Amino acid sequence: MILSIESSCDDSSIAITEIKTKKLIYHKKISQELEHSKYGGVVPELASRLHAIALPAILEECTPWFSQLKAIAVTNEPGLSVTLIEGVVMAKALSITLNIPILPINHLKGHIYSLFIEKEVQLPLTVLLVSGGHTQVIEVKSHEVMETVATTMDDSYGESFDKVAKMMDLGYPGGPLIEKIALDGDSSRFVFTVPLWQSPLIAFSYSGLKNQVRLAVEANTSEDYPDIACAFQKTATDHLLQKLKKYFKLQKPQRFAIVGGASANLYLRREIEILLAIYKVPLLLAALEFCSDNAAMIGRAAVEEYARDNFVNYTDVMVNARCKL
Ligand code: KG4
Ligand code: ZN
């Protein structure tokens, strides 16, 4: 079995995955959303201290499996350096104590493997990763070859929801809060320009849209927030759709998946489904509990790394806050 640890942002999570069957045996996650909510975003130092409490508490529950562990998997990149280090230090301590190697896992790769936790998925696969830290289109050609073909030039899709929610004083994380108030909104009352709509680039940008929304929030009252949220969600999603359409003209996917925390957004899911229906491309999604950060996806990614002997000695595992897939 592999014990996996995730602490790249504000979720402390540990999972145990059986190597041979790839089955998830144990999974627990303690989210810090409430603690960060009053600040309207994640406070890295606070997140780090909360991981230092939550991770050992979860680990206690895993002791019955210790004798069966063959490796420790840990998210070591990308993420907040002060929170990644909490998981990495725990992985190193376990590696020394149990005398087993470490499998360092890239968090973005982990999100891709959220699709594989409950079922096998055929490759190749085109993935839209929409999280708080990333907005990317990734071509998963095989378990070894994954290529980022489009990325954001500034903010990410999920992050823009967080920032708009903060402007409206709704709390954190902003995604579910904006999606909820948008249900009572009229998307036609406010018109925002779709980012990069005239640009031939297949890339994303959310900072300009965020500023358009800021002006609307400042010029109106809280009664208008549902309409602003609805128009914002539509424009943010239209931007993804427009660039995906451009990309599909170059490269029609065989199958398509949305992963990451923001893949829980039902409006986004529906709009992508409509787009894919035109191309007759199937849409794959992870179970809701595995969309946001979790150690189960890290464990599932680690099973593939285990098969390839991608072990690293505890002395060589590094935290890399800013890195790509
Ligand atoms: O994947 P994740 O848990 O963490 C990162 O790797 O960043 O994603 C968290 C992000 C947050 O920005 C959150 O607001 C966003 O996902 N999110 C959503 C929704 N649920 C979570 N964004 C839009 N709509 C949602 N329903
Ligand atoms: Zn994530």
Image: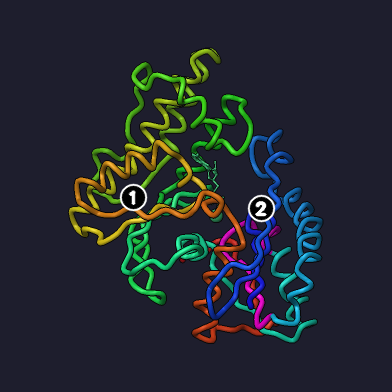
Percent of width and height locating residue 105: 56, 70
Percent of width and height locating residue 99: 74, 86
Q: Which numbered circle lies on residue 256?
A: none
What range of the chain is rendered magenta? 69-84
Visual colour scheme = rainbow
Mark 1 lies on residue: 203
In the image, what residue type sits under mark 1? Ala
Q: Is mark 2 within 8 Å of ligand 1?
A: yes
Front residue of this view, candidates 247 and 290: 290
Closest to the camera, between mark 1 and mark 2, is 2
Q: Decide if residue 324 is in sight here.
A: no
Residue 202 falls inside the magenta stretch: no
**For the residue carrying disc 2, how many other residues have a C-alpha within 10 Å: few (<14), some (14-19), or many (20+)?**
many
Q: Is 151 drawn above or below residue 226 in the view shown? A: below
Q: Secondary structure at mark 1?
A: loop
In-image side of 281 versus 56 (left or right):
left
In the image, what residue type sits under mark 2? Asp
**In percent of the image, x 66 and y 50: which residue is there?**
10
In-image side of 294 versus 28 (left or right):
left
Mark 2 lies on residue: 11
Q: Of the two numbered discs 1 and 2 on the same chain, state the one appearing first in sequence.
A: 2
Residue 81 falls inside the magenta stretch: yes
**In percent of the image, x 41 and y 35: which residue is there?**
208
- Find the distance from the CA under tag 1 to the CA under tag 2: 28 Å
In-image side of 252 versus 304 (left or right):
left
